[in-house]
Image: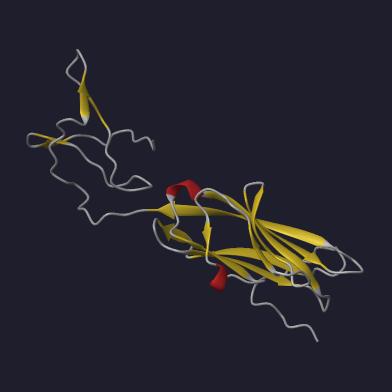
Amino acid sequence: MAIEPPFPTEDYGFGAIRSVQLVVDPPAVRRGQHATLRCLYDLDDSPLYSVKFYRGLREFYRYSPGQQPSKKIFPFPGINVDASLSDNRQVVIKNVGFGLSGNFSCEVTADAPSFSTATEHISMQVVDRHNVPLCTRTTLSGSCQHSPTSSKRCYIVTTKPLHGVCVQMNTHILPPLMLFDI
């Protein structure tokens, strides 16, 4: 008897695999916090051969119940897997940094006789937010470059993604600036 998964199903037409979905929890991961990648799948009564997690094209975690050890962690810069919380359905990444924003995937393979495989992808966003007011009074000494036309180029690193930056000169609030994520 197959248990209905708590997510929309999609028939992959690959024999044993009925559905696969990849979820990031939380949806926007705060820098320095943990992220959980959940690979939700229904094998339609077939045994599991393996679940693999990738960052881009590179595998960093594998669960294979028929092998010893069943959990394998592959070195990847910036990815610190918590093996005690990771299993055949999820991988927990500790102390997430900005460099991990991007594409992740999980690949599920059913065991014999079909060895059918299905992969799902998701983009993870790593954010940081400092508790600062939308407009902050700041002296920009040392962080700005003067040009011959008396304009300034300033680099403000307070949040990622950038938001809520305004400039006031004397008593006038200037129009919004073009912001670039560097």
Q: Quadrant of the C terminus?
A: top left
Can you name the residue that lies furthest to the right here? 113
Q: Quadrant of the N terminus?
A: bottom right
Can you name the residue that lies furthest to the top here? 148
Residue 122 location, quadrant: bottom right
Q: How many marks can you see?
A: 0
Residue 180 location, quadrant: top left
* Colour scheme shown: secondary structure
Q: Nearer the viewer, residue 165 or 122?
A: 122
- Residue at image location 84% in from the left, 63% down from the top: 116
Q: Nearer the viewer, residue 126 or 169?
A: 126
- Residue at image location 77% in from the left, 60% down from the top: 118
Q: Is residue 72 left or right of residue 33?
A: right
Q: Is residue 49 left or right of residue 88?
A: right
Up-down: is 63 above or below 100? below
Can you name the residue that lies furthest to the front here? 68
Locate residue 6, reporting x and y percent.
64, 77
- Residue at image location 86% in from the left, 64% down from the top: 115
Locate residue 142, reporting x and y percent.
17, 30
Can you name the residue that lies furthest to the left here? 170
Residue 120 location, quadrant: bottom right
Locate residue 177, reporting x and y percent.
28, 34
Locate residue 80, reporting x and y percent.
51, 58
Q: Nearer the viewer, residue 13 or 107?
A: 107
